[in-house]
Amino acid sequence: MSADLERYREQYGPLHIAMLGTRGVPASYSGFETCVEQLGSRLVQRGHRVTVYARPHHITYPHPTYKGMRLVKIPTIPNKYLDTIVHAFLSSLHALTQDYDIALYFIVGNSPVTWIPRLRGQISILNVDGLDWKREKWPGWAKAYIRFTERLATILPNAFLTDSRVVQRYYRERYGKEPPYIPYGAEVTRRPPGPVLAKWGLEPRKYILFVGRLVPENCAHHLVEACNGLDTDMKCVIVGDAPYAEEYKAYLRSIAGPNVIFTGYCFGECYEEISSHAYIFVETSQVGGTHPALLEAMAFGSCVVVNNTEENLETIGDAGFAYDGSRGGEALREVLQHLLDHPDLVEEYRRRALDRVQRYYTWDAVTDAYERMFYELKFGLGEQAP
């Protein structure tokens, strides 16, 4: 922990921080929730008070606190288009009755409500994540709305930030505003082979792994198509699920060969065990900023192969392989077959991946950056001061 943060804490005391816009904790769906859990729990350990707003139809955890974070469950409308923004709006109204110093929002689509905490003098900050309007799941009107919320993100909160240099450049070039960059983190617990691998008939280092939501823009079909034509007896394991995507999930199963295993959602110890023993991890997504599952795969020491989007290439640096996403499964199959034929190369890049995460993507460093930003905005210090 840096000296300036210790000085800030001694001089200004602990902060009361609210986290809004996600499903809540314990994390059980996506990278947003994982970020809230990892960041919030560390802020608590540093003496701050943290409140997390949760959606009761997603978070069934019965206790009022989790890892030291206070949970406030606010109802919403469980609908694909209204769930997030309605919950963020009602949570923001609740925030007006509280003594928060910082209101940290996630997801650019929540930008229209980020002005509300400012009515009480609370500092409002928004993590915009990736370029969500590129996702195929959104109809045209929804894409237009998300583009509109991008502009609002540069106006309504006190500050906004991103976890991707690529997205940072996009906001600079399109809107003339450059958000601070704070990367995502990765912290994993490696587990020995056990009941999870046994359940699916898997052996360590004998399967290729995908982890993510099964929606079209995440392109899991690239891996299914690639694995169907590989010269190998390795399994292909697809971990994940998604609401509102039944047609796509049915399509994946219809094209899957006998070596493809769909596990559904897999969290906690299940996720840790299955991620600890993959031979190769594949990130097929064509949309988004820094993908948490990719960073965590690198932290598990997997050799990683990614769709060659700018964001994915930024994440892996020289510590992974890429395929031409425009060619889909055919291009991915070529890369995978080359790696399967050269196990020494896989071992080298497993070491590279782990080293890159340990140097650039730790949750402690991420927490330092957020905490510094909070103090600087709240008390008019440093470069972040409004």
Image (cartoon, helix red, strand yellow):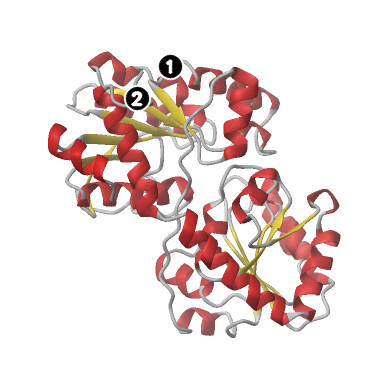
Q: Which residue is at the front of the view, 131 or 312?
A: 312
| Real-space Cα separation, disc 1 to disc 2, in angstroms | 8 Å
Amino acid at circle 1: Leu
Amino acid at circle 2: Ser
| Corner quadrant of residue 26 | bottom left
Taking the spot 46% from the left edge, 70% from the top edge, the residue there is 272
> Can you identify the residue that label 2 sits on?
124
Please say whether residue 215 is visible from this viewpoint.
Answer: no
Taking the spot 14% from the left edge, 34% from the top edge, the residue there is 11
Q: Which residue is at the front of the view, 25 or 257?
A: 25
- Image-based side of 185 in relation to 63, left or right: right
| Corner quadrant of residue 220 | bottom right
Q: Which residue is at the front of the view, 87 or 294?
A: 294
Question: Badge 2: few (under 14), some or many (20 or more) residues near its Cα, within 10 Å?
Answer: many
Q: Can you say whether 131 is above or below 359 in the image?
A: above
Question: Badge 1: few (under 14), some or many (20 or more) residues near its Cα, within 10 Å?
Answer: many
> Can you identify the residue that label 1 sits on?
156
